[in-house]
Amino acid sequence: MAAKYSRIVDRALTRLKLKQLRLLVAVGKHGNIQAAARELHVSQPAATKMIQELELDFEVKLFERTNRGVIPTVYGEAMIRHGKLIFAQISNAAQELDDLTEGTSGRVVIGTLLAASSQLLPLAIEQVLSKRPNVTIKVVEGTNEVLMPGLRAGEIDLIVGRLPIHRHRDKLAQIPLFSERIQLLVGSSHPLCKKTNVTFNDLKNYGWILPPIETSLRSQIDRYFVDMEQYHPPVTIESVSYLTNRGLLAGNSNLIAVMPAHIATHDVRLGLLQYLSFKLPFETGSVGISYRGEDQLSPAGNAVLSALSSVAETL
């Protein structure tokens, strides 16, 4: 086993070319060698030969041929994942060199979950731009299921929001920032607005806006519904878009939304939305940052990391 490992490492160091890795990633993306060859401006026979050389060097089968094209084997998936990370590191190196040259430039891709999108992240971005006005910041919104693969592949630098409780934690650094309260929100014209001491029976006949099924908060909600005599809402809308949720609640609907309390603070103050006087049994969750490690971040990325920690102390 050790001899095989040493042999493969030696071949990778002496024979592996970036163009081969680019082809590997392209084939994984397209599921088709011909399309990948076109993307790299090489002939299909040349692309096929490059893949065969990779399979010989690494002594594994990287793709399975089907009548629809090719699909990566487990070995192919591993190679594609590492290839993406290598290209992400090259990009980070280029950004860091540019940052060192310009002093205040760079580019950071931030994944955000609902819990961070209204206050924490905007304030942190404002703080970064005040000191580094030439930094380009890209924000990608989604759930952990959507964002975490991008983080691991190097396409996203860090994710800020509710930290995953069980999944997606392996080989990632996490910084808890603060605990959030989970509350029920309704529009200002909802029938339960003026009711004090709302009970679960009061909630049963209304539709709910819930986080997607793959989120940890949704798992907690679903378990709670099971405990409450296998309750099923008459209407369920799955959404992580606050603008959509806000519009649904503020309209003439009788929906109830489950979300972090601080997300809607501004709209509650304006009288557009209202918290219900109902206590959920899972009021808190940890909001924080997930990333691959400080040595994986550019200077601009570390500036965002520092700003998020600084802003969190004030919230």
Image: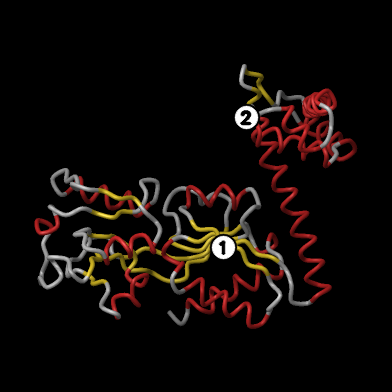
Task: Name the side, left or right, on which 195 lies relative to 178.
Answer: left
Say which residue label 1 marks: 139
Coloured how?
secondary structure
Name the one closer to the observer, 19 or 4: 19
Give the residue drawn at x 39%, y 64%: 243
Residue type at tag 2:
Val
Name the one closer to the observer, 131 or 174: 131
Name the one closer to the observer, 131 or 83: 131
Secondary structure beneath dot 2 equals helix
Q: Indicate the position of residue 77 as horizontal and vertical percent values.
A: 64, 34
Question: Mark number for residue 74?
Answer: 2
Q: Indicate the position of residue 154 as horizontal and vertical percent values.
A: 66, 52
Q: Indicate the position of residue 183 as horizontal and vertical percent values.
A: 27, 66
Secondary structure beneath dot 1 equals strand
Task: Name the side, left or right, on which 233 lies relative to 219.
Answer: left
Residue 262 occupies quadrant: bottom left
Task: Name the side, left or right, on which 134 lies relative to 113.
Answer: right
Split into 4 quadrants, where in the image is the C terminus?
Answer: bottom left
Give the residue drawn at x 86%, y 40%: 13
Q: Residues within 10 Å of mark 1 (few under 14, many from 20)?
A: some
Kindly report which numbered mark, 2 or 1, lies closer to the viewer in this rendering: 1
Residue at the far right in the pictured view:
14
Question: Mark number for residue 161?
Answer: none
Depicted 178 relative to depicted 240: above or below: below
Give the distance between the C-alpha atoms of the residues marked 2 and 1, in whole angstroms: 31 Å
Q: Earlier in the sequence, mark 2 or mark 1?
A: 2
Split into 4 quadrants, where in the image is the N terminus?
Answer: top right
Q: How many marks?
A: 2
Residue type at tag 1:
Val
Residue at the far front in the pictured view:
252
Task: Name the side, left or right, on which 124 lies relative to 163.
Answer: right
Depicted 13 relative to depicted 163: above or below: above
